[in-house]
Image (tube, grey):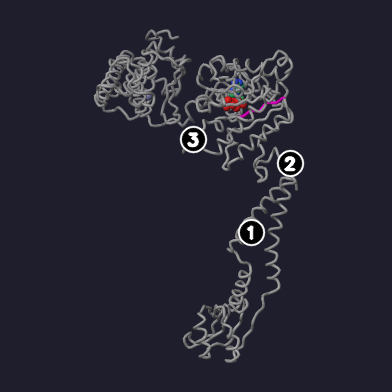
Amino acid sequence: MDRNTIQKILIGLFLIACIFIGLKTFNIIGFNEFTEAQTVSNTVDLNANVSSSRMTYGRFLEYLEMGWIKQVDLYDNSRNAIVQASSPELGNRPQLIRVEIPVGASQLIQKLKEYNIDFDAHPIPRKSIFFTIASNLILPLIFIASLIFFFQNSENFSGNSGSSPMNLGKSPARFDQRPDTGISFNDIAGIDEAKAEFEEIVSFLKEPERYTLVGAKIPKGVLLVGPPGTGKTLLAKAIANEANVPFYSVAGSEFVEMFIGIGAARIRDLFKKASENTPCIVFIDEIDAVGRERGAGIGGGNDEREQTLNQLLTEMDGFKENKGVIVVGATNRVDILDAALLRPGRFDRQITVNLPDRLGRIGILKVHAKNKPFDKDVSLVQLANRTPGFSGADLANLLNEAAILATRYKKKTITKNEVNEAADRIIGGIAGTTMEDTKNKKLIAYHEVGHAIVGSVLENHDEVEKITLIPRGGAKGLTWFTPEEDQTLVSRSQLLARIITTLGGRVTEQVVFGDPEVTTGASNDLQQVTNIARQMVTRYGMSNIGPIALEDENNEQMFLGGESNEAIADRIDTEVCKIINHCEQIATEIILDNRVIIDLIVEKLLDEETINGDEFRQLVKNYTVLPTKN
Ligand code: ADP
Ligand code: ZN
């Protein structure tokens, strides 16, 4: 048995002892009565052929006088009796009856003698005395023994056992004896600015004298700000590794505890350990869990968290001259952090880690493709084009998913197919099976080709990536467009193009099958269209109402003097309708102009189920001139 097992067993015993001692203190369990009652019921069980019941002491005396009692067995210092009786009331059958004898009924024995009843007084068995002593002594002994054990061993166990009661205040931070976290700067791509910032810190950790000699102060705290999965943890690990110093990593949530003072104690312990091992890096992930603005939590203040935060602030002030503990915090919510944390001398340096851009994504994909056998036909550049908004973790996940698919298909290398399928899965959800129902399938094919044609004809719309009838997520068919890289500034004509293209699906259903055949399938499209049009009116000032913000980003009406709210709501609705009607008209024109191509492409799509962007453009080019897109 190793130490851990022993420790676990002792914790178990400790808890049991606590429970028993508690129960005994409040007299919930009395062991004496317990054993006696058992003896009594055993007797009854032995005579199971005779029925048993209870009677009051008064009634027992009556029976005695009537001469219906045959035998009496006294237990428990004459507090209980089992009586053998047979009476005409009970059909003259012999009965075992239990009687509780009130305290002070002292003449009972005398009465029994008087009536010449056969009786016996049973003493408390020896075993019971022993048990009583045991129950009163052994459990407290276990309790005390466990306490001694914990106190003696808490030093040895600290560092890896946050769970033992004596270690509640010990930091659960993992301490890597070897500074080798296995991550180097080469494993990180796409966040070059952040890397550059850190290189300086690495050089400080390596040769602190160079800096202190010229009186330079090195930041104590560096805050990494950015969405999850962008490589913040990776960066912190890489500096530890490159500088060859110990790396302590802990999540902010581990400091959030029920009991006041425990979180603070953990912080104290963490910094104590760190300062014994300088130079080193302390990495606190999700620092917002501890560092949230004080007094801003739900229901006002939270004493435990405030204490923890105060402790963190104190510790960071503690090392006046930085002797080599660098605290790296990570968060995606710098706005909710307590201002005190960001003051000079604490986290005075902030490094933003953004989602990677196209080049960054190519870099990250290259890093993660290194140890995977990719087929020559796989283009990481193309994949990067397809994945704006993906974080480093998403991209790593994508390639891993592709590798899993390749294994499933028993392939030696990962081909374009697996990579595309993995991307489709992550963007659109798991694929379903295509439907058999030919009529609906045809309708969906027209709907999707409608989106694709309208999107391609419009100059300001993204390129078609592919059209497919394989259902995915909730959608029965899908048209993918290669999204624009930078989506932060979108022009009015781009928004209109989106509306027209999104309407294109339903408009095609209408044109091809007629009004009565239009389906409910376009409800999602319509929702999107309405959202975009509404925002154009209320937030972007892109309607006849003019450049006025009528709603904020949460669709809350802004206060406008003068007009009543209803009048404004009416005007908004009118403008939204105008935009959508206008767009529907354009979509209809495009569909009518391109009926022939649409029919051709639908036929091909029904055949092949998926058409990629290049094939699609090739087909369309034979019939119409497509605008060049940037
Ligand atoms: P964060 O701490 O920002 O939430 P992590 O550093 O834990 O994100 O990243 C999770 C995983 O995603 C990493 O282990 C790595 O595989 C991958 N990853 C994230 N960003 C990058 C990047 N810039 N370069 C390479 N891999 C990355
Ligand atoms: Zn649609």
The residue lying toward the viewer, choosing from 18 and 34, is 18
In the image, what residue type sits under mark 2? Glu
In the image, what residue type sits under mark 3? Gly
Q: Does the magenta stretch include residue 283?
A: yes
Q: Which mark is residue 155?
A: 2
Any part of residue 98 in sight: no
Spot occupied by residue 88 in the image (x, y as percentages of width and height): 48, 88
> Which region shows up in magenta?
279-284
Give the residue at mark 1.
21
Q: Residue at x 64, y 55 (%)?
A: 18
Spot occupied by residue 157 in the image (x, y as percentages of width and height): 72, 41
Q: Is mark 3 on a helix, strand or loop?
A: loop
Give the residue at mark 3.
297
Q: Distance between the residues labelled 2 and 1?
A: 28 Å
Q: Does the magenta stretch include residue 278?
A: no
Q: Quadrant of residue 509?
A: top left
**Number of marks:** 3
Residues packed near mark 2 inside 10 Å, few (<14), some (14 to 19) or many (20 plus): few
Instruction: Mark 2 or mark 1: name the one nearer the start of the chain.
Output: 1
